[in-house]
Amino acid sequence: MALLFLALSGCALVGPNYQPPEIPAPKGWQASLEGGLAAEAPDAELLARWWEVFGDPLLTRLEERAVGGNLDVKAAVARVREARALRRGSRAGRAPRVDLSASAVKSRSSADSSFGMETEIYDVGFDAGWEVDLFGAVRRRIEAAEAELAASREGVRAVLVSLAGEVAREYLEIRTLQARLRVLRRNVDLLRQVYDYTLDRYRAGLVDELAVARSRGDLEQTRARIPQLEIALAAAKNRLAVLMGEPPGGLETELREARPLPAIPATVAVGVPADMLRRRPDIRRAERQLAAQTARIGMATADLYPRLRLAGSIGLEALRPEDLPQWLSRTFRIGPSVSWNVFDGGAIRANIEAQDARAEQALFAYRKTVLAALEEVETVLTAFVKDQEQLHSLTIAKQAVDEAARLADDRYRAGIVDVFAVLDAQRAVVAVEDQLAQARGAVAKDLARLFKALGGGWRLMETGGSFSAPNPD
C-alpha cells in the first residue's frame, strides 16, 4: 500500500489549476491624441528614465536619490525578503524531517500498587518522518508561495513607479509655486509704483482719496497672496524631502534658488492600452495574488483526502549510561501510517468554500485594477490635451492684457482716463500671469502623471546604483 501511495503521489493534484484571466483591452484610447500625443509605442529606454525628458539635471538627481532613501521602497524590499523566506519554508515540506533526541529518566513505582521499585532509563537516537504529498497539498503550498513572491516583487516595482511620479510631481509643484511667487512679487513692485504715483498726484490735487484707497487696496490684496503661496511652497519642499527619506527641510539648500519650469517635449508616445496593461506592475501584482489564492483552494481541498506518513527511528536505550554503546542496546522503529479525517462537522468543506470566495475576490480585485489603470490613463490623456489648450489661450490672453495695461498707463499719464482704468488693467495682468504660471505647471505635472500611469520608471531604477532588485532565486 505504501508503494502504491508513493506512485500516486507524483500525479495526484487536487484543486483548480490556475489559468490567467483574459480581459480584452481596448484597441485604442478613447481620449483624443492631440497636443503632441502619439499612438506609437514608447521607447523602452526613454520610458525607463522618463523624467529626463524635462531636461532638468536636478530632477534627475532627485529621482535617483529617492530610490535609495525612500522608506516605502525599503519596506517593499523587506516584504520581498519575507516572501522569499516563506517560499523556502514551503519547499521544506518536500523533505523528510529528522530530529535528534536524548533523555535520562529516573522513575519509582508506588509501593501500594507495585513493589516501589526505582528504575533509570537512558536513550539517544534519531527520529525521522516524511509526509508523502499524495494529493498535492505541499505542491499547492509551494505554488502559492511562488506566486506571493512574484507579487511582492511586482509590489516593489509598483512603489518605484509611484515614487518616480510623486518626486516629479512635487518638484514641478515647487517650480510652479516659485514661478507664481515671482509673478506676484514683480506685480507687487509694479503696484507699489502705481500707488506711489497715485499718492503723488493726490498730494498735487489731481486725484481724490478714492483713487489712493483703491490703489492701496490692490497693492495689499496682491501682497496678501504671497504668504499663502510661501506656505504651499514650504509644504511641497517638505513632502519632497520625506519622499527622499530625509527630514523636512533637508532639501532647502538645493531648492532655495528659483528655477523656471522644465520644458515639455513636442511629442509624447503613449502606445496602446494592451501594452500599458502588460507593463504596469500593479496589474501584474494583482494577477499573481489571484494565482496564489487559487493555489490555496487546492491546499484546502487536499484535507479531504487521506494522508500518508512514513516514520522511523533508530537509537540506543539502556538502564545505565555505560551500556549505551553496546550492540544489544540498539532500538529501531519504522513503518507507514495513514490518517483520514472522516468527520469534522463540515470544517474542511467550509474552508474550501472560504478559499474559493477569496479567489473570487482576488479576481474582482484584478479586474478593478485593470479598469482603474485604464481610467487613470484616459483621464490624464484628456487633462494633458485640455491643459495645453488652456495654456495656449492664456498665452494669447497675456499678450492682450499686457497691451491693455500699456495703453491704460499711457492714457492715464496723458490725462485721458482715470487711475481706476490703470488699476483694472494691472489687476487683469496679475490674474492672467498667475493663471499662466499655474497652467504651465499643470501641463508639466500632467506629463509626469502620464508617464506614471503608463507604468514607466521602474526598470532602470530597479538596477540603479543605490538599489538592486531582489533576486527571486
Image (cartoon, grey):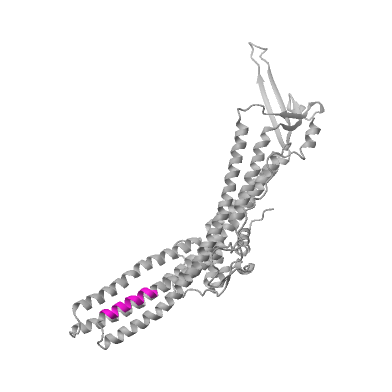
Quarter assignment of residue 89: top right
Q: Name above or below for residue 293 compared with residue 398.
A: above
Q: Name above or below for residue 21 compared with residue 12.
A: below
423 drawn magenta: yes
Quarter assignment of residue 133: top right
434 drawn magenta: no
Magenta residues, start to end = 420-433
Say which quadrant the N terminus sits in: top right
Q: Magenta span: helix, strand or loop, mainly?
A: helix
The residue drawn where x is 82% and y is 28% is: 327
- Between residues 142 and 456, which one lies in front from this camera angle? 456
Quarter assignment of residue 269: bottom right
The residue drawn where x is 51% and y is 64% is: 380
Q: Which residue lies furthest to the left in this view?
A: 205
- Between residues 12 and 248, which one lies in front from this camera angle? 12
- Between residues 319 and 441, which one lies in front from this camera angle? 441
Query: Residue 301 location in percent, x, y?
Result: 66, 36
The residue drawn where x is 67% and y is 25% is: 105
Query: Residue 465 location in percent, x, y?
Result: 61, 65
Q: Name above or below for residue 139 compared with residue 398.
A: above
User: Is 190 on the left or on the right of 379, as rendered?
Assistant: left
Does the rendering let one see residue 58? yes
Q: Name above or below for residue 260 compared with residue 346.
A: below
Query: Residue 451 location in percent, x, y?
Result: 56, 65
Q: Residue furthest top?
A: 112
